[in-house]
Image (spheres, rainbow, N blue to C red):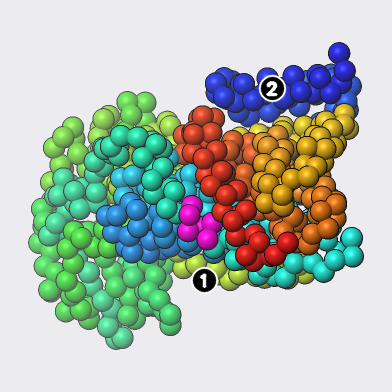
Amino acid sequence: MSQLAMVLILLGAAVVMFAINRPRMDVVAVIMMVALPMTGVISMSEALVGLSDPNIVLIAALFIIGEALVRTGVAQRLGDWLTARAGASEAKLIFLLMVIVAGVGSFMSSTGVVAIFIPIVLRIARNARIPAGRLMMPLSVAALISGMMTLVATAPNLVVHSELMRQGHEGFGFFAFTPFGMPILALAILYMLFARRFLAPGPAPVLPERAALTGWVADYDLAGREHRLRLRPGSMLAGKRLDSLDLRASAGINIVAIERGSRFRRKLIHPRAQTVLEAGDILLIDQRARGQGAGFDLDTFAQAHDLITLPVSGQWFADTAQEIGMAQIIVPPTSRLIGQTVTKARFRSTYDLSVIGMKHGTKPVSERVIDEPLRAGDTLLTVGPWRAIRKLMDERRDLILLDLPAESDEAVPARHRAPLAVGVLALVVVLMVWGIVPNVQAALFGCLLLGLFRCIDMAGAYRSIHWQSLILIVGMLPFSLALQRTGGVEIAAQALLGALDGASPRLVLVAIFAVTGLLGLFISNTATAVLMAPVALAVAGALDASPYPFAMTVALAASAAFMTPVSSPVNTLVVGPGNYQFADFLRIGVPFAVICMAASVVLMPLILPF
């Protein structure tokens, strides 16, 4: 059996496994990485070359940049804008999403655009109660079409441009692709508005209702207990540390948070023993009406300490949910805290959280919770920074995280660093657009800056990378080398030249588009462009026609990789989030690839005459 036959058998086996979705796609990719060297066509080192491919590193870096946009609230705000503009209309949402993605992708990697927009789209789908599968395919289609917008939008455009110049022709202009990309984008929007009914069919899932902060305020009888007090410039509390004041013992006051204004924004400070109060600070206090401190009078306390009483309601926690969070935790029977009070257990010092509510079973504790001995099974309502709450998730012995409010999904850990994240993204895009440094270097530089500006931490960076998608891409890259080395691609190209003898220019364009699209099913679109560009220019020369329509056809067909999840990394990235099967891409992608081919062939002689 020839080596070419063995490679084709493995390729067919991979396609079959992808089609039946058994085993999962990244496992299939690993199987191929192991099997291809056994054919003798490539070595094991060559099978693993994808792990050092700059594009793989670029994709990983862009995942990190996307996560930083999520952590700083940029993605949330863009999603809110899309949702607000679209309202309850799924059709309008798809329209706006595809236009924005195609626009952004015109100046940076389409793969990077998808990596950035995946968390945005997931959030939009969750908030709008739309299955994610109804939006992920429009996202990938728009990202692929973005490659048809400008010269630098995707690598195949630059490959074709370079081949033209190598053969003595002028290359394409920066916006030479736009007259083709814009009409195809319009067709794609119309098509996806129709085809969305075949993606995640049926009604949107009904998400279970989760408790909100306002609900917890009612459950734990917090309303009417919370007060806000502002320190006047001459207040005796200004300039003093909290541990020296000891307001818990002297007045039965538990300071939950401190609001402090700065030149540009207000910030919330979580109180600690060493925190020094300043004039103008606003103290959020929790004070019980009974028990120790029962004789406390808010107005008397305010006058004695030169404080101003400000209005507050249970809604305060919901309004500040981006900066301060709540969590319900339970005391397990094995906890060392049983029998201790919150004060004696040094709860705030240990966990960086304040306990403002307690339940024995289902009954709220009406006495001061900080002086109530803890029992097995008690539920505590805690308030504090979201980072402290997330850290509590790792606690398993003394406390168990029971529940988080619905607002936790919307919490943004580094919201005030959003301008820095946007600035870094803009810098990365400029570096990529102007080619000042290689794309992967620009993206890694952006990651370093985001870490320096604390827009993301190392743990968040590693968690943000979708390793399954990267392994799938890495595992399929060796097929490109194997097919070229065994002569399979060259045989296909020569057959095309023989079959086109005497055909009209339009029919030749159809054939070039179709062959480029079919090759793109199995090898990367960049490799396809490398192989097909010289063939297309040779055909143009044989027909004594302008080379530009034929070269442009190759570029457009290389971007029209809609047909399978492995046709492009763009498709691969949305498989998991959209919960797609191999057949979904065939059902939706093949008809639109035909539409794209027809549009290209019709427009080509009008824009680039033969």
Q: Report the amino acid beneath label 2.
A: Gly
Q: 461 or 253, which is in the foreground?
A: 461
Task: Answer with left or right where residue 78 lies relative to residue 58.
Answer: left
Task: Answer with left or right where residue 385 lies relative to residue 179.
Answer: left
Within the magenta stretch, is there residue 184?
yes
Task: Answer with left or right where residue 261 lies relative to residue 437.
Answer: left
Magenta residues: mostly which secondary structure?
helix
Furthest residue toward front? 502
Relative height, residue 315 to residue 513 (above, below): below
Q: Which residue position holds label 1?
A: 419
Point out residue 490 in the picture as x, y percentages from the top left corner: 85, 36
Relative height, residue 328 to residue 103 (above, below): above
Q: Which residues are magenta?
A: 183-188
Instruction: Please identify the quadrant where the N terminus is shown.
Output: top right
Point out residue 432 in the picture as x, y percentages from the top left corner: 70, 65
Q: 64 or 540, which is in the foreground?
A: 540
Other-residue count near label 1 (Cα within 10 Å), few / some / many at <14 / 14–19 / ≥20: some
Q: Report the amino acid beneath label 1.
A: Pro
Q: Which residue position holds label 2?
A: 12
The answer to whether any part of residue 514 appears in the image is yes
Q: Residue at x 30, y 39 (%)?
A: 204
Furthest residue toward top? 1
